[in-house]
Amino acid sequence: MNRRQSLKALSISTLGVGLLVESCKTSTKQVDVSNVDTAVGLEEFEVERLKQLYAQPAFFNAHEKSTMVVLADLIIPKDKVSGGASEAKVVDFIEFIVKDIPTHQLPMRGGLKWLDLHCLNTYEKTFVDCTSAQQIEVLEQIAYPGKTKPELQQGEVFFSRMRDLVGTGFYTSEIGINDLGYVGNVPNIWEGVPKDVLKQYNLSEV
Amino acid sequence: MGDKIQIKKSAEQYDVIVVGSGAGGGMAGYVLANAGIKVLMLEAGPFFDPAKQSKQMQWPYESPRRGASTTRAFGDFDAAYGGWQIEGQPYTTKDKTEFSWFRAQMLGGRTNHWGRISLRMGPEDFQPTDGLTDRWPITYDEVKPFYDKVDKMIGVYGTNEGLRNEPDGIFLTPPKPRLNEIFIKNGAAKAGVKVIPGRGSVLTEALPGNKDRGACFYCGQCGRSCKVYGDFSASSCLVIPAIKTGNLKVITNAMVRQVLTGKEGQATGVSYVDKTDGQEYQLNAKIVILGASTGESARILLNSKSAQHPGGLANNSGVVGKYLHDSTGASLGGFLPQLMDRKRYNEDGVGSVHIYSPWWLDNKNLDFSRGYHIEYGGGMRMPNYGFGAGTPKMNGLVPDRDGKTKNSGGFGASLKDDYRRFYGTQVSMAGRGTAIARKENYCEIDPSVVDKFGIPVLRFNYTWSNEEVNQAKHMQETFQSVMHEMGAVITTKIPGADTSYGLEAPGKIIHEVGTIRMGDDPKTSALNKWCQAHDCKNLFVVDAAPFVQQGDKNATWTILALSMRTTEYILEQRKKQNI
């Protein structure tokens, strides 16, 4: 089978496969991942596990959620290239992932509490109620590992975890992938580094 | 389940029963079925057809966990059912030694997700001259015709280089290097490290004479298994085609407990538990072929005790389980500042290696006896769970746009800008080296633990020696030197003596071999040079268990060649009515 035939076979072989077809049709919107019946190739225990996770009540309460929305957009704000973290529904991803990987739960809950307590002590307001200047002032103190005052160390550890989860949530979303400019995951032919790029780096084809 | 168990005996007799459907079992089933033999294959896991069950071409957001490794060790899209631990099927370790055992229970086994790096072992791997390990009872020249046939039948890309111990093959065109790989190649050259095109079982062009498999369309996702069969999996390339001959029947979810033997000590069949109904079944066969994996095949033999075989089947020598060895592994990561703000284009390429470094030095001048090869990674890959953690660690290591170096970390517009700037700059290198086959490293039956089927489980005893630790130290020095020469910034903490230089725990590289080794002397080996048990003439082993000593070459291509060789021997012996 040559490449053209193989691509044809790919499109035929996907016809019977729910999620792939779904993903083709819905390339411009989020796939409904909660519909576990469409999850192709999963083992039974994986499907069961997903059903159980979706059946659980929300882990984060409304206040925690709104705090995370503010934090997420401070970490990855809207700019001229793309929308912000909340637009990519990063907090929904965090809500799922703390159930899927429960070791995130305590540090996230406790970290959000730490943040509020720190803000209450400093500004007499919870983090979401602080002015954006105050919010930024707090983050400036905990966003640079190695530069944090010893008494704020716990805040740094929490913020690093939050930043990692926001980074994953955003850049694995369609908005984030487009923002990065990842243009793969499509059938193509790899013919090596484009000529203009070789020239840019003064390299010759190997 | 929960009901009374019965042993259900079948009156039917099969010509051959093959246990396992991976590279070894799959090849045996394929060769036999195509020769017109009626074969029954038992697979411990479910049926798996990459065309239907692969997660190829899914986007990260189609996984609610964005590809995290919560239920699959190598991430949500990876094509392995199983992992380092399987519920209800434990294994143990002895005296606080370490061993990690990766099992995939599914049609095709671990070949559905493997790296497709397809290297032949060389003349010196089969016949080492340093006296450290035993020689194989066969030479490279005896295996070469089978490597050639495997190349032609399955397809492998690469280049003929005329190297001493990295034999040439019958190659398809290799993929061209990616941008970061050109930097690696140039940096490595300055560091005195040879880099050549990779060798992988991916169809970079149509495979002559094969109408069932599609050519690669460069998604770089071989680990998910390929819907058009553009890479080698035993499921897609061996077992499913063998089923189509009408001569191979597969029973899935069949966990083999033991090989049954008769009064003369010959194999008469196997006993297995059907995972779906919990019942025990016994089947008869004239020949039994084990391809259950290095660990599982040894476990089956050690659990097949009888009056004639008190130490387990094929174990008069006492070597079954011994000489277990994995490959060594160590790695280092960094990024290329000169690639910041790089132009975007699709460089997914193939899912195996585009380039690699075969072992390039003479061990005479080194403090370890055998070599390693280096595999390289990096580039503009599809983001997945964990993406985003790297940038806030890198962005303070090089000057910003304004020429000033800021603190690593941050948030907001400048961090978002950094995510874009640093995307695709990363490089990684991983060494895979020869670990020494030693009698003292073994698996055995744990005397006090059974799995949920009541089958006694394996207990591992494995420690590294200075040979492996010194090799890992050399890897780290090499990686640093290549990173330096290519102008990369190293981001991983450079591991020192306290962590054995980042040497991975035994088993972690998933190249374990050697537990049922072959040899000419029945006192020191379990199998003869045809992988036929010395003590049981109608029993054969076709996975990596027969390896005497593997080189730094990933095992699969040798498993395929040896399994084909053994199976052709079985066909000849049947004709002569010797078995």
Image (cartoon, coloured by chain):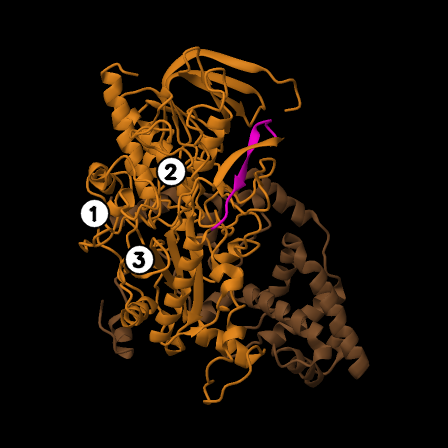
Describe residue B422's horizontal placement relative to residue B385 as left or right: left
Q: Nearer the viewer, mark 3 or mark 1?
A: 3
Determine whether the residue tagged by mark 2 lies in a helix, strand or loop: loop
Residues packed near mark 1 inside 10 Å, few (<14), some (14 to 19) or many (20 plus)? many
Residue B501 colored in magenta in the image: no
Reading the image, the residue beneath label 3 is B363
Reading the image, the residue beneath label 2 is B544
Q: Nearer the viewer, residue B307 or B347?
A: B307
Q: Nearer the viewer, mark 1 or mark 2?
A: 2
Q: Are marks 3 and 1 in contact (CB under 8 Å)?
A: no
Q: Are marks 3 and 2 on the same chain?
A: yes
Residues packed near mark 2 inside 10 Å, few (<14), some (14 to 19) or many (20 plus)? many
Note the chain letter of the orange one.
B
Q: Nearer the viewer, residue A192 or B506?
A: B506
Which chain does tag 1 point to?
B
Reading the image, the residue beneath label 1 is B169
Determine whether the residue tagged by mark 1 lies in a helix, strand or loop: loop
Note the chain letter of the brown one.
A
N-terminal of the pair, mark 1 or mark 2, is: 1
Q: What residue sits 33% from the left and 38% below the top? A: B559
Q: Three-letter amino acid code at disc 2?
A: Ala
| As drawn, A127 above or below A169 | below
Q: Which residues are magenta?
A: B452-464
